[in-house]
């Protein structure tokens, strides 16, 4: 039993940490997909702004989805 725990511990330590999805860089995308990449980047920036706002307002995890949806709708209404 002890070797199994040891192997499991090593496997957990060897795993790479999970990273957030990076921002899309339209300049590194094929020209035919550049417009879609620009739209995706703009959406990612809006989502990050709302997430930062939620962090600053100290929104509880259970209320975060509603807060983010409301924030994204408010940004879309402004544009």
Image (spheres, rainbow, N blue to C red):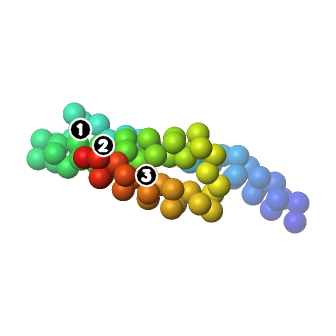
Spot occupied by residue 1 in the image (x, y as percentages of width and height): 87, 66
Taking the spot 29% from the left edge, 37% from the top edge, the residue there is 25
Residue 58, image x and y in percent? 63, 46
Which of discs 2 and 1 lies nearer the camera? The answer is 2
Marks 3 & 1, CB-CB < 8 Å contact: no
Residue identifier under label 1 = 26
**What residue is shown with label 2?**
41
Q: Secondary structure at mark 1?
A: helix
Residue neighbourhood size for the residue with mark 2, other residues' Cα within 10 Å, grouped as few (<14), some (14–19), many (≥20): some
Element assignment for label 2: helix
Q: CA distance from mark 3 to mark 1?
A: 25 Å
Quarter of image, res 22:
top left
Label ID, residue 71: 3
Q: Residue furthest bottom?
A: 1
Badge 2 vs badge 1, beta-carbon distance below 8 Å:
yes
Q: Residue at x 44, y 57 (%)?
A: 70
Disc 2/disc 3 C-alpha distance (Å)? 17 Å
Residue 53 visible in rendering = yes
Residue sitting at x 16%, y 45%: 35
Residue 12 or residue 75, whichever sits in front: 75
In this picture, is 56 found above or below 5?
A: above
Percent position (x, y) of residue 68? 47, 54
- The picture places residue 43, in percent across and down from the top left corner, at 32, 48
Would residue 16 be seen by someone viewing this image from the given angle?
no
Distance of label 2 from label 1 (alpha carbons) = 8 Å
Secondary structure, mark 3, is helix
Q: Nearer the viewer, residue 44 or 11?
A: 44
* Residue 3 appears left or right of 63: right
Residue found 37% across the figure and 45% down from its top: 46
**Contact, mark 2 vs mark 3 (Cβ under 8 Å):** no
């Amino acid at each position: 039993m002890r070797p199994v725990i040891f192997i499991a511990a090593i496997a957990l330590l060897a795993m790479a940490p999970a990273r957030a999805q990076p921002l899309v860089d339209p300049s590194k995308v094929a020209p035919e997909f550049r417009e879609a990449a620009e739209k995706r980047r703009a959406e990612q920036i809006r989502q990050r702004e709302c997430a930062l706002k939620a962090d600053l307002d100290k929104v509880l995890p259970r209320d975060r989805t509603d807060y983010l949806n409301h924030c994204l709708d408010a940004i879309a209404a402004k544009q």
